[in-house]
Image (cartoon, grey):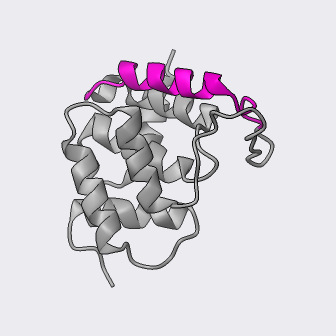
């Protein structure tokens, strides 16, 4: 089934990046649309988003709630994760200027036990409010632009 609008296209692409090949659920699409309309993103908003996309995921704000992502070892689970995430969200503005840096910081922090890729891309989409070319295509050009000297 071919996506019918930008939100559906984005969620489909975001899921495929994670190896999820089924069409997005109605709940995923509604949650994504709601997320994009938020005036600012709070920790509660992000946790609510993740609970739909990855219901078993938990915030890594507890000592010992560690994860490993390939060769990347994010900070160990601790209350510091919550504090850093709140700080990151307070700096995330609805502007594409900081989307690249915030996305990299978010994915490096890896604040949840799972669902970080899709929630990180949703946060990026919320900041840019523009993604007709798809996340990977747009992010590629943001990466090139951010790394020009």
Report x, y in % for residue 50.
Answer: 46, 52
Q: Is 68 on the left or on the right of 27, as rendered?
A: right
Q: Is 80 on the left or on the right of 103, as rendered?
A: right
The quadrant in which residue 94 appears is top left
Towards the viewer: 118 or 96: 118
Above or below, comparing residue 87 to residue 132 in the picture: above
Report x, y in % for residue 2.
Answer: 30, 80
Report x, y in % for residue 106.
Answer: 53, 33
Residue found at x 39% / y 49%: 48
Furthest-top residue in view? 149
Residue found at x 55% / y 47%: 116
The quadrant in which residue 130 appears is top left
Towards the viewer: 61 or 17: 61
Above or below, comparing residue 128 to residue 3 in the picture: above
- All told, the count of numbered labels is 0
Towards the viewer: 145 or 136: 136
Give the quarter of the figure containing the N terminus: bottom left
Q: Is 115 on the left or on the right of 74, as rendered?
A: left
Above or below, comparing residue 47 to residue 127 in the picture: below
Boundaries of the magenta span: 73-94
Confirm whether residue 123 shows in the render.
no
In the rendered image, residue 62 lying in the magenta stretch gets the answer: no
In the rendered image, residue 86 lying in the magenta stretch gets the answer: yes
Confirm whether residue 57 shows in the render.
yes
Residue found at x 78% / y 37%: 64
Report x, y in % for residue 52.
Answer: 42, 60
Q: Is 67 on the left or on the right of 112, as rendered?
A: right
Residue found at x 55% / y 22%: 84
């Amino acid at each position: 089934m071919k996506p019918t609008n930008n939100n559906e296209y984005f969620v489909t692409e975001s899921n495929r990046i994670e190896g999820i090949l089924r069409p997005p659920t109605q709940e995923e699409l509604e949650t994504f649309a709601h997320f994009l309309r938020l005036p600012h993103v709070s920790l509660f908003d992000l946790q609510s988003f993740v609970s739909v996309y990855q219901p078993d995921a938990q915030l890594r704000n507890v000592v010992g709630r560690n994860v490993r992502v390939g060769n990347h070892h994010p900070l160990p689970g601790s209350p510091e994760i919550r504090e850093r995430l709140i700080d990151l969200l307070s700096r995330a503005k609805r502007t594409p200027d900081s989307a690249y840096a915030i996305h990299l910081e978010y994915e490096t922090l890896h604040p949840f036990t799972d669902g970080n890729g899709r929630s990180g891309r949703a946060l990026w989409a919320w900041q840019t409010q523009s993604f007709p070319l798809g996340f990977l295509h747009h992010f590629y050009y943001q990466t090139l632009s951010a790394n020009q000297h």
